[in-house]
Image (cartoon, rainbow, N blue to C red):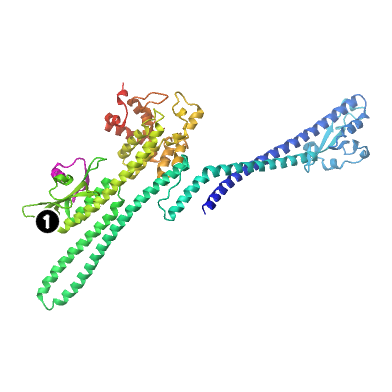
Amino acid sequence: MILRIIMSIRTKIITIIALTLVLSVTATTVILIRLQSDEIINSKFQDTLFISDLIVKSIDNAMKEGRTVDVQKILENIGRNRELMHLRILSPDGRILKSKNGAEIGTKSRNYIQNLLYKKQGPTLIDKTAINYFKEIPNREECYKCHANNEMPIGIIEIKHDISRSHATILSIKKLLVISSITIVLSISLILGLLFSRFVLKPLKNLLLTIYEIEGGNLQATVKVSGNDELGIIGTSFNNMINTINSLHDKNINKEREIVRIKAALDNMGKVEDLNSQLGLKIKELEKANKAVTFLSKELKSKNIELIKTIVRLKKISDVGNILPSTLNNEDLMKIISKTTAEVVNAEKVTLYMRNELKSSLTVQYEKDTGTKTMDRFPLEYKTFYDKMLNPELLITPVSEIYKIEDNNQNIIQIGMPLEIKGHNITGAILLENKADGSSFTEDEIEILKILSNQASAAIENILLYDCLKNNYFATIKSFVNAIEANDRFAKGHSERVRVLSIELGRYIGLDFTEIEVLEHASILHDIGKIGIDSFILQKHGKLTSNEYSLIKEHPVIGEKILCPIGTLNDVRNIILQHHERYDGKGYPYKLDGKQLSLKARILTVVDSFDAMMTDRPYRDALPLYKVREELRSNAGTQFDPDIVKAFIEMIDLKGEQFLSAVGYNITLKITT
């Protein structure tokens, strides 16, 4: 099966190339044959005209010397050429006066009768095998002995020139060109087949074998990588993807088991509800016999209402449980958790704090009347509570226990709980304050808080795992980019600085989490295509030649082709392909203008140019910061999107030079003069 697929691919590609070659060579051959044929016929036309002029001059000489008898000999001598079928001198009425064939003298010329318009036509091609030509012999003074001086013309030269042998020559050339074309096409097809089998089909066969093994259930199968070319990179990426899929598969199995357990619990609750309905019917029957049962019935109805409320709450918990695993942004996740918790337990205020060793800590608070907000600073009034929750050594009760605060009437007015992830690591805490109706938090609501805390912990753990996977992924990419930049001291750190500035500008403009991730990928990989450019050109001091500059302009296309096999990076490839286009449509590689460029590509263009001007290059030193600002503003609307330039300058002015120093720029060398 695999062999058939590979052979089919090879056959199709080689067939397309062969057809293209056949069409190209055939068209060239036809044109050459047509030109050769026209050239030969034109040559014969010129020969015919030359013979007619030669005859006229010979006749003139004979007339001057009084040798009129020599005219017939002239025709017979010239007529020995086998290609001259007819060579005659006619009277103006078409009678043959002289001829290479003396037997036809005195007869009428058929060709003359058929070509009475000879004065306008000139030489005429007949059936591509002969040329007919009629030329007048003018009356001159030396001809007055035999002709009246007013006789015009005194005769007509008729020539019929056979060109059939030239036509046969053209056919021979046609055959030779056709045979040569077929030989060239077959040779090129054979060479392409051998090269394609060696460099493409063999690696592709390894990849397809692995895919079939995986389809058969062998998730441990890997591609045998035999080189570092594009197919080798695809094989390595495919192996990494399979490893990631195996990891996610294991996690999904664990989550499915948890879901089965929760569904079983919900099924039990449904059975309890059915039993309550049956019990309600029995109570109605007993009301007629005993008034005491009425009181019991009312009590059960109250419990039923509470049960319905619990079911509604559990439904909300279930809905949140379906949403949380798909949320990969910490802030969005915390907003969902805080709002849902407040709605389920009817709390006035919910404060959620999460610490992150890789990023800054985050605090989100939900209030019933004002909604959800992200707090710039950690509220000092909650410091004591969070210190107890986040430090196991200070906990009065075990981590699994709830935190409670009661008022003077022993009503629970605050409840809280740490958020615990796998391995008993505490990553945050949640605090609920005051019931909206002024009542106390119940034990049921405390249990609900535990369920929500567990769901929140699982979702937070997913985000931490995603962040870890993303960090490892970016670490791999950075290592690869650093390896590319290691041989060029001028490019060292360029991609990382562009990544940091692009993310900050994207946030300043208002891009969402997903768009910023795409921009981050594109920023770190935007110069990956330079791996295909000679390092001599990249590090050349002085002006590049036109050929060298043309090679440099290919690096966006090379980068796009390198990432082409990775389907998840389609948006990233588009940004990389466009990051050297200009807003006015004069960039490269495709001269797209601002309306055709993506927003993220326009952001990357500004940041990439900023870094290039702010750092030393082989052909010049770094520019001062004020000069870079002037360059950005002066090229806004031509090279750059003016709105992006304006936002970028506003951002760096807002963050200050300290921010640029932290990114990696030597601001002390770029002070305004």
The residue located at (27%, 46%) in the rendering is 330
Outermost residue to the left: 408
Q: Could you tell whether 502 is left or right of 357 in the image?
A: right
Residue highlighted by disc 1: 440
Q: Could you tell whether 186 is left or right of 490 in the image?
A: right
Q: Position of residue 274 (x, y in %)?
A: 23, 69
- Which is more toward the observer, 206 or 147? 206
Q: Is residue 365 visible?
A: no
Q: Which residues are magenta?
A: 365-387
Q: Where is residue 570, by image quadrant?
A: top left
Q: Position of residue 9 (x, y in %)?
A: 54, 49
Q: Position of residue 371 (x, y in %)?
A: 21, 49
- Which is more toward the observer, 386 or 363? 386
Query: Considering only vertical position in the picture, is 529 above or below 321?
Result: above
Report if residue 376 lies within the magenta region.
yes
- Which is more toward the observer, 112 or 229? 229
The residue located at (65%, 40%) in the rendering is 28
Q: Where is residue 95, by image quadrant?
A: top right
Q: How would you rate the neighbour count of disc 1 (Cα within 10 Å): few for under 14, some for 14-19, many for 20 or more?
A: some
- The amino acid beneath tag 1 is Ser
The residue located at (8%, 52%) in the rendering is 407
Marks counted in the figure total 1
Q: Is residue 614 visible?
A: yes
Q: Could you tell whether 101 is left or right of 492 in the image?
A: right
The residue located at (30%, 39%) in the rendering is 507
